[in-house]
């Protein structure tokens, strides 16, 4: 279950982030989690920009994996775990403009003010990607300062 490849990725990492042009296999991901896969295992992938990524980091980067994010959190994934660049899963979702993932993470208690190693917050990454102003009815007190999430 905890076998690793040369980049220190577990089967769970590979199921969430399969080779290019392949969709993540949500059923396989669920089976791995049910069998006790370590949801907080980290990678060593210097060439892929994923150094220190957990399965939650990878899921946050993929549009449409909101339920998987919820499943990972349910079984103990650390919501504010930072990778070696200081990016949390919320940074990853914001950098990718994945609004549903952002909403799920904020609703689940992600730190919206977390700063990565270069001093950027998730809001800065979202603004940098022109995600624009969002509307959120989730937890207004947790919404990025000056930015809301949801429908425009």
Image: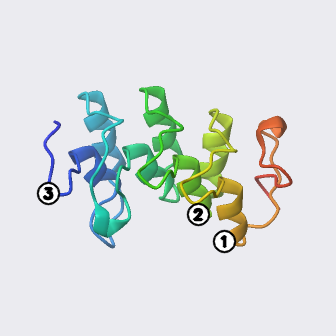
Q: Considering the numbered disc 2 on the image, is that residue within a helix, a strand or a loop?
A: helix
Disc on the earlier residue, 1 or 3:
3
Disc on the earlier residue, 2 or 1:
2
Question: Circle 2 is placed at which residue position?
Answer: 95
Q: Residue at x 49, y 42 (%)?
A: 69
CA separation, marks 3 and 2?
A: 27 Å
Q: Considering the numbered disc 1 on the image, is that residue within a helix, a strand or a loop?
A: loop
**As drawn, is 114 to the left or to the right of 14?**
right
**Residue 105 lies in quadrant:** top right
Place of residue 80 in the rendered image (x, y in percent of width and height, measured from the top left): 53, 38
**As drawn, is 60 to the left or to the right of 97?**
left
Question: Circle 3 is placed at which residue position?
Answer: 6
CA separation, marks 2 and 1?
A: 7 Å
Residue 13's place in the image compared with 62, above or below, is: above
Q: Considering the numbered disc 3 on the image, is that residue within a helix, a strand or a loop?
A: loop
Disc on the earlier residue, 3 or 2:
3
Residue 23's place in the image compared with 137, above or below, is: below
């Amino acid at each position: 279950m905890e076998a690793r490849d040369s980049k220190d990725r577990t089967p769970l990492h590979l199921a969430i982030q399969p080779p290019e042009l392949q969709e993540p296999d949500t059923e396989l991901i669920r089976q791995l989690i049910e069998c006790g896969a370590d949801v907080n295992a980290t990678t060593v992938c210097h060439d892929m920009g994923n150094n220190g990524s957990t399965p939650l980091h990878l899921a946050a980067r993929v549009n449409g994996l909101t339920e998987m994010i919820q499943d990972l959190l349910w079984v103990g994934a650390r919501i504010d775990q930072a990778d070696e660049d200081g990016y949390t899963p919320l940074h990853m979702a914001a950098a990718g403009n994945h609004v549903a993932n952002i909403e799920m993470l904020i609703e689940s208690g992600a730190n919206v003010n977390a700063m990565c190693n270069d001093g950027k917050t998730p809001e800065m990454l979202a603004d940098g990607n022109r995600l624009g102003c969002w509307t959120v009815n989730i937890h207004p007190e947790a919404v990025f300062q000056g930015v809301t999430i949801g429908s425009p």
